[in-house]
Structure formats: C-alpha cells, structure tokens
Amino acid sequence: MTNDKGVAKEVEWRIKVEDGPWKRAGVSCNMWTFITSLYFKVCKFFKKAWDIGVNDPRKFIHCLKVGIALTAVSLFYYLKPLYDGVGRNAMWAVMTVIVVFEYTAGATIYKSINRICGTTLAGLLAFGVHWVASRAGDQWEPIIVGVSLFLLASTATFSRFIPTIKARFDYGAMIFILTFCLVSVSGYRIDELFNMAQQRISTIIIGTSLCIIVSTTVRPVWAGLELYVLVTENLDKLANSLQGCVAQYFEAQTASEESNKKMMGYKCVLNSKATEESLANLARWEPAHGRFNFRHPWKQYLKIGATMRRCASCIDALIGCIHSENKSSNDIRKIMSKTSIQVGDISANVLRELAITITSMTKSNKLDILVIEMNSAAQELQNLLKSYPNTQKNDDAKMEIPIMDIIQVVTMVSLLTEIVARVEDIVNCVEELSNLGKYKPAMSKCDKSKQHSTDSKISPEQQNEEEAIVKTLQVV
Amino acid sequence: MTNDKGVAKEVEWRIKVEDGPWKRAGVSCNMWTFITSLYFKVCKFFKKAWDIGVNDPRKFIHCLKVGIALTAVSLFYYLKPLYDGVGRNAMWAVMTVIVVFEYTAGATIYKSINRICGTTLAGLLAFGVHWVASRAGDQWEPIIVGVSLFLLASTATFSRFIPTIKARFDYGAMIFILTFCLVSVSGYRIDELFNMAQQRISTIIIGTSLCIIVSTTVRPVWAGLELYVLVTENLDKLANSLQGCVAQYFEAQTASEESNKKMMGYKCVLNSKATEESLANLARWEPAHGRFNFRHPWKQYLKIGATMRRCASCIDALIGCIHSENKSSNDIRKIMSKTSIQVGDISANVLRELAITITSMTKSNKLDILVIEMNSAAQELQNLLKSYPNTQKNDDAKMEIPIMDIIQVVTMVSLLTEIVARVEDIVNCVEELSNLGKYKPAMSKCDKSKQHSTDSKISPEQQNEEEAIVKTLQVV
C-alpha cells in the first residue's frame, strides 16, 4: 500500500512538473505586475510627499531645523568636555529635543514650558514623598510610595479632562506624572537621587532652550501669524464664494472650473474650526513678534471665525437653492439681477475690507461707508421685491404672478438679506478686535503721501516681518 | 546736605506712620477679599471638575485604570525577582505606561503598536549604522553617525507632514526618531549596546501589553462605540432641531428654554467634525468588540457626518430666516402650516429611523416608506404654494398678493425642500453603511414574537454589550 501511494505521488508529481514552466511564467508575470504596480504606488507616494514640501517650503525648513537641533544636542555625547559635564543624562537632552520641537514656535514654547514646570513640580513633590517614606521605615516605604503614586497619577490624569487645563497644561500634566513616577519609583533603588534629579532638570533646560532658540530664530513659524493669515484668507475666500455664486446665478455664466473652485472656498471656512482653535491656543504662548505683542487678543480671532462659519453656512444653503429644480422665470431674474449682484459685490467688498483691516492692523476709513452701502443695497433689493409686479410696464393693470416663477428669486433675496446681517456680525467682531488690539486709524491718501517722505523711519525688522507675511500669504 | 536729607526722610517717615493703622487695616481688608475670592474661585473650579466626572463616570474609572496600571508596572521596581530580570530598564516600562495609556482602547492600541514598531525598526537601523560606523575607524565614526542621524531625523520629521502617515503613524515616526537617536548616539559610549536595546524592547513590550490588557478588559472605552453613539446622537439632535424650528415658526409657540435648547442641537452637529475624525482614526485599530468586527466601515460614519453637517447648515439658515424681520402674514402661514409641520415631522422621523438603523445595526423596513412619504409631503408643500392664491375662498376673483407677506414662508418652503433633499443624502449614506456593514434586515413584529421564544439564546456577552451601549447613550 505504501509503495503504491509512493508511486502514485511520483506520477502526480511528474504530471504537475509538466505544466511547471507555464505556471512559473504565470507566477513571474504576476510578480512582475505586482512589482510594477508597487513601484508606481511608491513613486506616486513620493511625488505627493514632494509636492507637500514644494507647496510649503517651510515644511522642508522645519525638517532641517529638527536635524540641526538634534545634531547640536548630540554633541553632548561626542565632545568629551561636554559629556563629562552632564554624563549619561545627556540622553534626556536628546529626548527633550525630539519630543518638544514642534512645527510652530508657539507649540515648541508651550511644550518646553510645560515640560520644565511639570518636571520641577513633580520632582519636588517626589522628593517630599521620598523623604516622608524613608522616615517611615523599610516596611512602610513601598506602601507610602505606591499609594502616593496611585493618588497623584489618578488626580493628574483626571485634571487632563478639565477643558482649561487640557487647553494649556495637557502636556505638563503628562510630564508631571512621568517625572513623579520616575523619581519616586527609582528613588527606592538609586541612592544618588538628588544628583539624578538635578542633572535631569539641567539637561531638560539645555534641550528646551536649544529648541526655543532654534524655533524662534531660524525662519520661525509663528502660530499667531498662521492664525492671522488663516483668518484673512478665509475672509477673502468667503468674499469670492459669495460674489461668485450670486454672479453665477444672475448672469447665468457658464461655470468654469476656476470659478467653481473659487465658489467652493466657503467650505474651507466651514472646516477650519479645529485648526483655528489649536493655533489660538498655541499663539498665546508666543512672545511679541513682528507687529503682535505678547497679549494680542488671539481669542477674538476665534470669534471672528465663528461668525464667518455662520455666514458660510448661509452661503451653503444659497448654493443649494441655486441648484434646486424650481428655476425662476427669466423675467424676474432680469429685474432683480442688477441689485442682487450689487448686494453680492458690496458684501464681498466689505469682507475684503475686513481682511485688509486685519492684515494692515489699522482701522479702515472705508468700512463704515461700505456697511451703509451694503445695508442700503439690501434694503433696495427688498423694496424692488416688494414692488415687483409694479415694476413691469403695464403699471396699472394689476396682474397675478405664478408663485413658482418667483420662489427661487425670493429665496435668494431672503438668504442674501440674512447673509448681509451675518456679514454685519463679522464686521462687529473685527471692530472689537481692532479695539482690543488698539489698531490705529488708517491713513487717507494725502496722509500717505506725507508719510512717504518719512518712510525711511520703518525699522528693518518691521520690513522683514512684512516680507514674512507676504511670503506666508503666498505659500498658503 | 546728607544730614538734611536724613532729617527730611525721618519726618516723612513719621508723617507716613501716622496713617499706618488705617492703611494696614486697608491692606488686610484687601488681602481678605483676595483670599476669599481666590477661595471661591478654587471651589468653583473643583465643583466644575467634579461635575465633569459625575456627568461621565467613565472618566473617573479611566483615572483609576491609569493608577492601577502604573502601580502594577512599578512592582518591577519593588519586587526583587522582577527587578533582577529587567534591572534599571524597568524605568522604560513605567514610561511606556504613562505615555501610551489613553482614554479610548483604540488610542492605547494605536500608540502601543506604533511604539513597538517604531522602536524595533529604529533599533535595527541604528545597529546597522553603528556597525558600519565602527568599521570605518575612530575618526569617521562620529561623522557617519551624525550625518545618518541628521538625514533620518529630517526624513522622519517630514513624513509626519504627509496626511496618510500623520493619521496612522504620527506617534510611530516620533518614536522612530527617538529610538534611533538614543541608540545611535549612546552607541558611541555604551559598549553593551545590544543588551540595552534588547532590554528596552522587552520592557516596552511589557508596558504596552499591560496597557492594552487593562484598557480593553477593565470597563473599556471603545473609540468605535463612541463614534457610533456620537453619530446616532447627532442624528437625533438634527431631528429635534428640524422639528422644533418648524413647529416654533408655524405654531407660534412660546419658546421655552427646554425647546430652545433642543432646537440648538444642530450646532453640536456642526461642531463635531474634528471629534468624528479622530475617533474614526482610532477605531480602526480596535479589535472586534461587541457587534463591531475588525473591519467595520468606520470611514462611512465620516461620510454620514459630512452629509449631516450639510443638513445642519441648512437648518442654521432656516433658523436665521425665522428670526428675520420680514414676518409673513398670518393668512399664508395658516394655510401652509399643516403641510410644513408634516414635512418637518416626517423628515425628523426619517432621521430618527436612520438613528435606529445605525443603533440596531439592521436594515429598516420602514425607511423606504418614510422617504416616499417625506418626498410626497415636500411635493404637496410645493403644490400648495403653487396654487396659493387659489386656495383662498374667493376662488374666481383673482387677487394680487403683496410679496412681502409671503417672502418668509416662501423661503421656509424652499429651505425645507432643500433640507428634504439633504436628508435624502444622509439616507443614501446610511444605506451604504448598512450594505458595507452587511446589516441584516430588521424583523417585522410577527417575526419578533417568534424570536421572543428563542430569546434565551442571546449570549451574556451580547447582553453586556447592549447594556454598555445603553449606558454610554445615557452618559453622553
């Protein structure tokens, strides 16, 4: 039996071998397709990654900055005199740089300060606990340390759920737990506890200072500046969307890809809440830079963002109505066209003027006039709608309007009125910002020509800052 | 001169002393106010913190879990046999627990896997570099190590800007840099590099396993379940908002605080994008739990969220129009009232049915009928508006309508129609989810009564899971 089976297997094997080359060819063909598809996928991935860097070269620069900071801190290992100073604890400096160095200066400073404060506070507390425990005798020592560890770690973990602490000291709370555990636990074994703690704190200070210096001096990326650029950009996008959708509806333009893309800009506004909040949280850690002082009212930008989103959701509804099936008659569209486009244009101009106000950090002269114009245009639009049947030629012969012919235009007008009201909310928020930030009034043209002769007074620093803003705007 | 001055000062001092007691009383009074105000502030803070925990007791439980995990891992220090096994590197296990243990199981697993993979990969690479460098001679060694450190750290930092990597391996990339630096830099000094690396990896594995075990077994908080609850809750909130605002307008209800709060529920929907995205990112790391398998289509929840936000922004515009100044005449409001409220109610029912579909993970029987009803109600509303002047009693006498009387109602109808269209988008997304998740069709009532007799077949695990969902829903 076993022999039979052996023969049968051999035969099977022989038969299988016969189609070997074909199969092998098939397998190698599959392999080849797999490899080429993988190759193209990898190429695509690298192309995408490269594009990210090319679109915003500051990302490349950030990577170089990290590399420089790390190489600098690793000198503590390579150079004998430095190594002798801090010893094996140089590792903590390297670790600090890696963990603390972030893209924006604000984030780096936030993490640095949190790390230093958390470490110091936890270190002191751990010493206290260790001292108490060591007096209590060998038996009680691990129990006292264990219980205090449990209680403090739980409390610090809970504190991270409290919104105010989460926004400002989340990282600090984590570092607090980390240091407390390391010191109090290793305190049980290491006798040179004081030395270790001292070295740890000094290495952390070395690491964080290096990070703060590099991130605030070598082509710094300020979270505050990013927020400021984001908000002004969003105002422009909102203006383009509003103007674009009104024009597309009333002028019955054929929507080019370019204009469609512009019209969809409001979506960026709707989606930027999380980014705005994190940037505002980080911006408050930054020192005075450029034209922003230390206590610049960053929170106000969040309010502006919120009102912008309210305006954007109205534009979203407006665009939905444009694409609905109830098309209005050309007649009423033609009549309302001019004033509606005017309302759209003036509102967009108000938004752009607000962007200029924020960018130039001066109170606008034109804003009040533009707001009045916007409101009167909106009122005119309503009056036009009110008198609609009478605007037609046969003035006396009162005629009936089929309601379906006007439903879309009426909705447009109502939503435009609502948008005008919401734009006014944005205006109020920006005015509040200009009061909080103590913006100076903008110069009129004749003032400007006077100023021109004293232009040389602008400090080179200020000029650099302006260049940086222009560059950031270009990049974003 | 100096003497004069001295006398003058003494006189001044005497004069000042005279109003000393008053001043002192003032200062102590100020101090007292300061202390009491501080006391009340601190009390308020603790009250708020306590409320956070009481509103969601899982946060308290999380803190206890962290405490337990930390105390357990610190046993490696206290117990001699364990300490002899891993030595001073037990510190890494403690650190791992602190850094890796997160609120949701998904986040813990994500960080654990990233930490292990990042450490292993970087460790191997660092060994390779170290080996090459050690062959190159003493002079070249620091240069090779330094250059490789610079290049790899920069590349890994850049990779964190790529969205796909940021979403899945952000923490891993950081740990990669960290480990590579520590191993390659300390490799220059420590000769027992291999031992150190091995111990580090083993302690990390000990720490992460402990975290994963505690976070998935002791009252786990699943990111997937949170996302699922968030989406269903948001659907309910949207339904309440929609129904509430239509009812408030047409029934001219006096808005109670309760109903106003319900009506504002749509704002939660508008603001939940960031939370949804982070939860979906974490949910994909979680193993099968309860009724969710490993490859549950979490991404689809994001699509549902996006369509919900589109619907919510339309509701926002609707609420804006309700509060506008152009009040419609009672006449048309009365005529449109019944059908409008019907549209609002049916749309809200559709949204609630969707919430039930997602909650019960079964395909609804009623959904198709409800959608048809909703569309026909919307059509009816349009027809009613179309025939508006004729619905009045004097059918033949065609009369003119003052347009300002109808503008608000027309806008309402238009926006309701748009909302109905957007609700249909949500329906499509949920149907897609039910196909992707292979939901079973819901049982009809007679099926249910049959099922009732076999109820005892439900496993205790499934029951527990259902209880957990009910509890989570209550908590949220």
Image (tube, coloured by chain):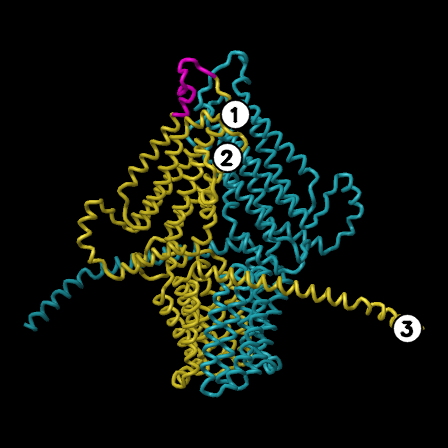
Chain colours: A cyan, B yellow
> Which callout, 3 or 1, points at the residue further toward the start of the chain?
3
Which residue is located at x 62 percent, y 62 percent? B37
Q: Which residue is mark 3?
A: B7
Q: Are marks 3 and 2 on the same chain?
A: yes
Foreground: A18 or A388? A388
Query: Residue under mark 2: which chain is it in?
Result: B
Nearer the observer: mark 3 or 1; the answer is 3
* Disc 3 + disc 1, Cβ < 8 Å: no
Task: Find residue B321 and name its label.
Answer: 2
Q: Give the SS element for disc 2.
A: helix
* In the depicted structure, whether residue A292 falls above or below residue B171: above
Q: Which residue is mark 1?
A: B404
Q: Quadrant of residue A15?
A: bottom left
Q: Give the SS element for disc 3.
A: helix
> Which callout, 1 or 2, points at the residue further toward the start of the chain?
2
> Which callout, 3 or 2, points at the residue further toward the start of the chain?
3
Q: Which residues are magenta?
A: B384-399
